[in-house]
Image (tube, rainbow, N blue to C red):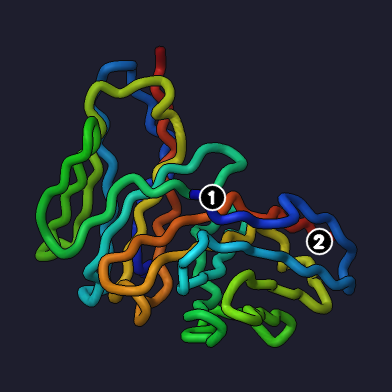
């Protein structure tokens, strides 16, 4: 069993729709959870960064973490064609100087149809 | 502030040759990480520097890979001799010290071994 499972898609939705992306994980030691957006031929760009369980909102993006279910989600409201990209979930046990490397999902390819 | 910079963006070499990848982290970021994405797989952690010291190199695939960070600034990742399975995209990331510090990624070096 992989440590982080993420459906690779593609996920295609019409412009303006609410998008729901999610990951499940198996290692209960993970405490820091991230969502990155990656455009073709570019590096992962940090979208959301959360610690432990709960919700975090930033503009059109909302990240949710449910540690009891080992499940994290990213919601995108009022989706735009420019949101079309690959969305990667990532997580780690520690942060800062004692940080460990991130464990990534494979990424979900999202397509927003104009 | 300038982001994480990686050079070259693309490298094509023959099996058995040597290649050196370079990463310049964001100024002031003591933590530097190397990752690799092999085609069809998720991004995998290779190693972590805190300043010039290797904090964790548990993800390095074998002794053909050598990472250095002299002076605690930029880092190099050398592959010698390169094998076909080393092909992939090599990403570098950096973060500040302290808790709750997310990692910021460069655009990667696409390495092709022929």
Q: Residues within 10 Å of mark 2 (few under 14, many from 20)?
A: some
Image quarter in which the C terminus of chain A is found: top left
Q: Where residue B91 sits in the image (x, y, percent)?
A: 58, 60
Q: Quadrant of residue B101?
A: bottom left
Would residue A81 be found to the left or right of residue B36 on screen?
left
Where does residue A24 sit, x and y in percent of width and height? 26, 58
Q: Which marked residue is nearer to the observer: mark 2 or mark 1? A: 1
Quadrant location of the N terminus of chain A? Answer: bottom left
**In percent of the image, x 32 and y 70: which residue is there?**
A92
Q: Earlier in the sequence, mark 2 or mark 1?
A: 1
Q: Provide the chain ID for the residue under circle 1.
A: B
Give the vertical position of B62 relative to A52 (above or below): below
Name the disc covering residue B2, or none.
1
Q: Dot 1, how many residues are within 10 Å of its Cα: few (below 14), some (14-19), or many (20+)?
A: few
The CA span between labels 2 and 1 is 30 Å
Where does the image place residue B111, in percent across and percent down from the top left?
74, 58
Which image quadrant for residue A93?
bottom left
Q: Look at 61% across and 55% down and name the residue there.
A: B5
The disc at residue B45 is: none
Q: Which residue is mark 2?
A: B113
């Amino acid at each position: 069993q992989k440590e982080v499972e993420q459906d690779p898609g593609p996920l295609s939705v019409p412009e303006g729709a609410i998008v729901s992306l999610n990951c499940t994980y198996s290692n209960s030691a993970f405490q820091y959870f991230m969502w990155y957006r990656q455009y073709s031929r570019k590096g992962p760009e940090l979208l959301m960064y959360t610690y432990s369980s709960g919700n975090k909102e930033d503009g059109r993006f909302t990240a949710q973490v449910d540690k009891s279910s080992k499940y994290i989600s990213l919601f995108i409201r009022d989706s735009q064609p420019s949101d079309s990209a690959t969305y990667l979930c990532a997580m780690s046990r520690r942060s800062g100087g004692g940080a460990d490397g991130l464990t990534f999902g494979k990424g979900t390819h999202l397509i927003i149809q104009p | 502030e300038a982001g994480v910079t990686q050079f070259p963006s693309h490298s094509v070499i023959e099996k058995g040759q040597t290649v050196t990848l370079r990463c310049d982290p964001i100024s002031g970021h003591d933590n530097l990480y190397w990752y690799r994405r092999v085609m069809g797989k998720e991004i995998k952690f290779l190693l972590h520097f805190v300043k010039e010291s290797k904090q964790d190199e548990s993800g390095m695939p074998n002794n053909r890979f050598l990472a250095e960070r002299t002076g605690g600034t930029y880092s190099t990742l050398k592959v010698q001799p390169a094998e076909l399975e080393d092909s992939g995209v090599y990403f570098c990331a950096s973060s500040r010290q302290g808790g709750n510090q997310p990692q910021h990624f460069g655009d990667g070096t696409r390495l092709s071994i022929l």
